[in-house]
Image (cartoon, rainbow, N blue to C red):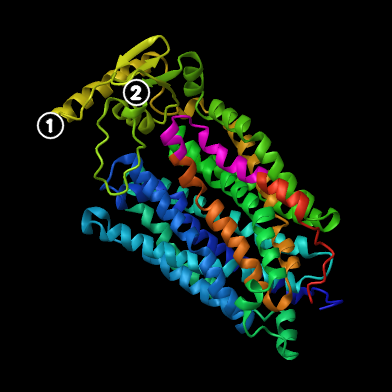
Amino acid sequence: MAGHKVDRKDTMVIGGASVGTVFEWYDFYLYGSLATYITRHFFSGVNETTGYIFALLAFAAGFAVRPFGALIFGRLGDKWGRKNTFLVTMLLMGVSTFAVGLLPSYASVGVIAPIALVTLRLLQGLALGGEYGGAATYVAEHAPPGRRGFYTSWIQTTATVGLFLSLIVILFTRVQLGSEAFGEWGWRLPFLLSGALLAVSLWIRLRLHESPVFQRLVKEGKTSKKPLTEAFANKKNLKLVILALAGLTAGQAVVWYTGQFYALFFLEKILKVDGALTNQLVAYGLAIGTPFIILFGWLSDKIGRKPIILGGCLLAALTYFPLFHALTAAANPGLASASERAPITVIADPADCAFQFDPVGKAAFNSSCDIAKSYLARAGLPYRNEAAPAGTLARVTVGEAALASFDGQTLERNALATQRAAWEAQAATALAQAGYPAASDSATVNKPMVVAILAILMIYVAMVYGPIAAMLVEMFPAAIRYTSMSLPYHLGNGWFGGFLPTTSFAMVAASGDIYYGLWYPVVVAGLTFVIGFFFIRETRNADIDA
């Protein structure tokens, strides 16, 4: 493709690839944006905290299988062609998403409902695992030398635009139907809308031409006969795959999911900001930050991919804690001031405290410590732990006030429920007297500050994500490029990134520290910076015809 110039027809082709990819991301992220409603309708058979973690695990299930989708469809893409492969992935994604909108709830069919939901999420994950590598490779192979960062950055915007589109559709539907109707059945409509989007996107994709690099490989008889073997049994190429994962995509993934998804979860689930307002604020942050993806893609053509990607990882690792503290102060000032003025402490025998995650809904968290902690976790309140002598009942201090818990392990079910309700009412009164709000007051939210913080998080996303497609394409040879680049990308984004909301929320629920979950992205981004700095070479001048 030496000397290839992108003409108007090529530009339309690249635009068509991007539009189709937006649809796939819209489908995939509807679930994350509607996790609260998914919990209510599909995981109502367990306690609230476990149900939400289960909903996040079902969200993460789609990410867990993305590397397998990368292997399956990457092999097809290197043998069968870029265009044909991502037509198949789009059809699989669209049908799976549409079906989510038709699934019966747990109340109707019991455990079959969450099983069916997870099955559809797995199909979505397989589809997305094959989609991204094909679209990124396709666009990069159309772009002229010196412009690959800029052209592939348009593909990079599709994930954010898809999330933005999902938020806008959800917000519009919620406003039109009202919160009650939306919560009961209206949440299904954004999923069902994907049927119409699928038809439009397939029409666009069918008009695309195969990439010039793949056409040349076919003409010269140089397509790979065994892409998986050539990609991963070759030590030199396998080393590149491992370095791409550890030194690029793992850090990129946790920065992406912290800036876009965990920020949304943090606002709605932990800071108790109204769901509609949360969607609005996140949408504004995405709108401000998304153009920076194009900017950093363009800039990577000038100064290189590596310094921008690793710079984003380093900034994220250094500033996440102060930024999320500032987010609390801006989004729920009542909580921030109360926790500073009257900090909460759970004083308990460590042996009395369980890790409160119940996979099958059968565990009974009825010790004095568990009763106190489960209430605080459900309320999204920060607390610290202090060890008490063995055998003593747990107590909760709110500033100078103290409230003794009770041991419910020997009580009958009705007596336990009565005493628990009475204790939680006492706790709610003590917390209210100390100034702890039951939820964020929308009128007191510093909306410009929240949007500014979300925009900063999004700029970090743009730094790590804008140049990544071009760099991955440039790292691997053309005959096995689809397969080689897809695996580290989806291992990073599917496993390191996809499990971030679940892992971080579980860390918060277990520790009581609402910021404790940030250690996960901070550590991963920091390690990626170190590995990438010492072991990854710059690629912007690489010849991708080879």
Q: Quadrant of residue 138?
A: bottom right
Disc 2 element: loop
Other-residue count near label 1 (Cα within 10 Å), few / some / many at <14 / 14–19 / ≥20: few
The dot on residue 349 is 2
Q: Which residues are magenta?
A: 507-526
Q: Are marks 1 and 2 in contact (CB under 8 Å)?
A: no
Residue 533 picture location, percent across and down: 76, 49
Residue 81 visible at all = no
Q: Residue at x 64, y 85 (%)?
A: 225
Instruction: Give the residue at mark 1.
Output: 412
In three-dimensional space, the C-alpha distance between marks 1 and 2, rounded to whole angstroms, equals 23 Å
Residue at position x 46%, y 46% from top? 502
Occupied quadrant, residue 142: bottom right
For numbered disc 1, what is the local secondary structure? Answer: loop
Q: How many marks?
A: 2
Q: Farthest residue to the front: give it.
A: 390
Q: Quick check: 133 above or below 459?
A: below
Q: Nearer the viewer, residue 488 or 108?
A: 488
For image coordinates 57% across by 60% down, the residue present is: 491
Name the amino acid type tagged 1. Answer: Glu
Most extreme residue toward the top, as rendered? 400
Quarter placement of the N terminus: bottom right
- Does residue 464 appear left or right of residue 427 in this picture? right
Question: Disc 1 or 2, which lies upstream in sequence?
Answer: 2
Q: Secondary structure of the magenta portion, mostly?
A: helix
